[in-house]
Structures are given as structure tokens and as C-alpha cells.
Image (tube, rainbow, N blue to C red):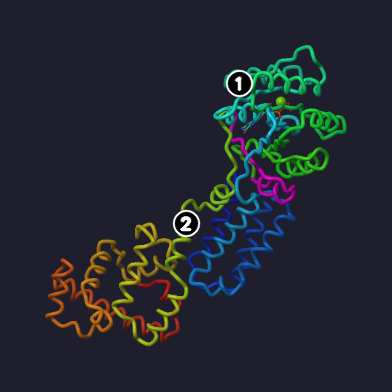
Amino acid sequence: MFESLSKKLEDVFRKIKGRGLLKEEDINAALKEIRMALLEADVNFKVVKDFIDDIHVRSVGREVLESITPGQQIVKIVHERLIQLLGGSSTHIKFGSRIPSVLMLVGLQGCGKTTTAVKLANFLSKDKKVYLVSADVYRPAAVEQLEVLGRTIKASVFLHREEKNPVNICAQAVEQARREGYEVLIIDTAGRLHIDNEMMEELSKIKEKVNPAEILYVADAMTGQDAVNVGAKFNDLIGIDGVIMSKMDGDARGGAALSLKAVIGKPIKFIGIGEKVEAIEIFHPERIASRILGMGDILSLVEKAQASFDEKEAMQLQRKIKKNEFTLEDFRNQIKQIKKMGHLNDVIGMIPGMNKVKNLQNAQPDEQELVKTAAIIDSMTRKERLNYQIIDGRRRKRIALGSGTSVQDVNRLLNNFVQMRKMMSSFSKKGSMKSLMRNFPF
Ligand SMILES: Nc1nc2c(ncn2[C@@H]2O[C@H](COP(=O)(O)OP(=O)(O)OP(=O)(O)O)[C@@H](O)[C@H]2O)c(=O)[nH]1
Ligand SMILES: [Mg+2]
């Protein structure tokens, strides 16, 4: 699921992520591709339109275009919007105050109601006493199916071989559950091929009779937009409280999951990810969004980078460099910032332009070297840090001793620093400050 969408989005982002400068045309081109990718993933076209319009508005603002990492900013915006599209944060079942809390599963034939009822019972039984009942009197083996599946998780199933009225069956099950001290009763209802009046009437009657804490619509992810449209009808006709999206392990394109909340306004609460009774998970919008964007931990790195590369500080630094006032103290602060971001090697790929510079200077920034550099600068007096020119031979010896390095190390650092300053001021005169800033301080 989502693989194809994920791959396409990664391709789009690869093109813009490493770039320091983005024009509005670049963003529009990227958004066009994102739009195509979403439509191909079978996301509702209206949902896609709103999504793209919204991202467009957020992306072409000055904060993004003039930031030091515009591509990353756009990935972040898309990520945030995807999370929203998927419902924001995870929503749990509300059990209410009645005992037992009745959960009613509804949905079309074969969408996975019976399997989901047992999965949910298994999931909830970790801290609740759960009872199951089948209200399907139409399909001959329906009750047995629930019974057999229920037995695999040692769940109790209400049995009613004589009663043929689904509403009565459910009412009796509630009574029985109350008598036996069950906290939750899950009703597995009968499915139909299509929504019809008879089905809805029956569900309405059950609802009226048992007053469920929640009605959960089981949506078959494999059926794409149909699952969304059918869900909307269920919601209109009997009202649903949430969705359990089954068969998320299949090769569905993901459009249903991405459209449901926006179209129906009801959250996905769980996902089914296999045929086994354990194959159910709480739905986490942020995790799914990260998975769709193939980012894993990258997002937190973006945040780290943003926190460290304070825009205001960067501007101040830029002014200093222009005036050739960049000091050893500024240098040390930059090293500290880099260190704040965590392990250097993890961060390197994150800093746009870093790879380019790495090749340019043919020197991989070395964590050890950074530590050493910081130690040497720390051993200087403030006066020395603000004016490197006063650091004579005697001072160099003292600094080496204080930092546990050699005079050669101190000499090398000072030479590099002077070189760097020269390079910076020449860069800044050529007007490519922005790209230099992004490569700073290597
Ligand atoms: N791969 C996969 N298969 C699932 C999942 N959930 C259900 N299934 C399969 O889908 C098929 C139908 O599941 P059921 O639970 O019988 O569906 P139902 O909605 O109860 O069907 P009816 O009672 O006939 O309306 C079964 O073969 C299940 O094993 C899932 O999350 N992943
Ligand atoms: Mg069933």
C-alpha cells in the first residue's frame, strides 16, 4: 500500500530538496506532479484539488522561497498537510459510560467485518472483558465463522441458534453481556452486496435497540473510492463514529485512506493489515504520512536543522561575513550548532549543498576534527577569538597546551580560518551568499 504513491512523491522531492533556490515555477511544476501522483493513487479529485491549492498557498510565501532550505520546507508542508488529510492525530474508541459498551461493525459483504470483530476483540481484551455476537442470520456459516475465529483468541461468543431476528439477537446479547460482566460487546452485522433499504432498516433497528457506544464502518481498502462513497452513505443513513480500514496490507493504492476523513469527516481509528487475528493496528496519521513520504527520521532532522540554523542568526552572520568581520568566536558558535544537531554523519545529508561542498573540498567533515577545533578555540581568550591577528607564537603554544593539541594543530586551524574568511568574503562579493551560508561552515 502507498508504495507507488510514495515512490512518485520521492521522485518529485528529490528534484527540489537539494536546491537552494526555488522559483514559483519550480514549485508549480512539483505541485503538478504531486497532483498527478495523488490522482493516480485514486484519491478523490476534490480532495486532491483542495490539498494542492492549500499547499500552493503555503509554499509560494516568502518564508519558504527565501528560506535557506526551500525544498525541505515544502516537504515539511506536504507532510503536515498529509497528516491532516489522514485525520490529524489518532482517535480512539469512545466506550461511553454504559456497561457493556456496544460497538457495532457495519459494512458491505466481504469487507472484513467478521475478521475485524475478532481482531478488535483480541486487541481490546488486553484491558477489557470482551464479548462477541453475530447478527448475521442470512449467511449459513456466519455464526460458526465468528465462533471458530473467536475460539482462536479464547473470546466468548454469544450463541443463539433458535432466534432468527437480528434485533432480538443483539438485545439478548447485551443482556447476557451485562449478566456476565462483559465490559464491551462487539456486534458483527450482516453484509450486503449493495446498500439497500432492508439492510439500513435492520441496522437502524439494532442501533435503536442497543444504543451503541460507537458504530464503526469497516472499509475495504482494496475497493478504493467505492469504500469512501459507501461509507458516506452509511454515515448519512445510520451515522458512523469512525472507520476501520481493512486490507491495508494489500496492494491498494491508498486513495481510500487519504480521502475518507476529508469526504466523510469521520476518523479512521484502526487499520487491518492481514488475515490473522493480531493483524490490527491503531491508525496513526503521522506515521502513515511519514511512510508515504518515505521519510522515517528525516522529518525530525529537518526540525533539528531548522532549530539550529536560526534564520535571524544566519542573517547576522551574513552581514558579518560581508564586512569581513567573521571571527573565531562565530566559527566556534557554528561548530556548536552543528554539534547540537546530533551525530554529524546523520546530519550531513540533511544540509542542502553539503554533498557538493564535500566533493569540492574533497574533505568529509570529520567529527573528531570538529571536536578538536572547538577545543582549540575554547582555549583562546575572548580577545583572541575576536581578533585572530594577535595570536602570536607564544599564545599559540599556550592554546595548544590548554586544548591538549599541538602547535601544528593550532597553526593549521588558524590557517584554515584565514583561508575560510578570504573565501567567504570573495563569495559574498559575488553575491552567492545564500549558497555559501547553506554550506557553512565547511
Ligand atoms: N489481507 C487481508 N485480508 C483480510 C483483512 N481483513 C479481512 N480479510 C479477509 O477478507 C475476507 C472477508 O473477510 P470477512 O471478515 O469474512 O468479511 P465480512 O465483512 O465479515 O463478510 P460478510 O460477513 O460476508 O459480509 C476474508 O478472507 C478475510 O480473511 C485484512 O486486513 N487483510
Ligand atoms: Mg461476516
Residue located 15% across and 71% down the image: 400
| Viewer-proximal residue among 148 and 349 | 148
- CA distance separating discs 1 and 2: 41 Å
Q: Residue at x 13, y 81 (%)?
A: 393
Determine whether 91 is above or below 413 in the image. Answer: above
User: Residue 244, relative to residue 335: is it above or below?
Assistant: above
Quick check: 159 above or below 37?
above
Magenta region: which residues?
254-276
Specify whether residue 275 is painted magenta: yes
> SS at mark 2?
helix
Q: Earlier in the sequence, mark 1 or mark 2?
A: 1
Front tag of 1 and 2: 1
Q: Is residue 160 left or right of residue 324?
A: right
Say left or right for 237 vs 77: right
Up the image or down, 74 lies above or below 146; here it is below
Residue 122: quadrant of the picture: top right
Q: Is residue 420 magenta?
A: no
Estimate the x, y position of residue 414 in percent, counting from the top left: 23, 77
- Residue 148 image point, x, y percent: 63, 17
* Quarter, ligand 1: top right
| Image quadrant where residue 383 sits | bottom left
Tag of residue 155: 1
Identify the image quadrant of the C terminus: bottom left
**Number of marks drawn:** 2
Q: Which residue is mark 2?
A: 300
Question: Foreground: 297 or 93?
Answer: 93
Foreground: 215 or 420?
215
Tell me the quarter of the image containing the N terminus.
Answer: top right
Whether label 1 lies within 8 Å of ligand 1 gets the answer no
Q: Position of residue 88 (x, y in %)?
A: 62, 51
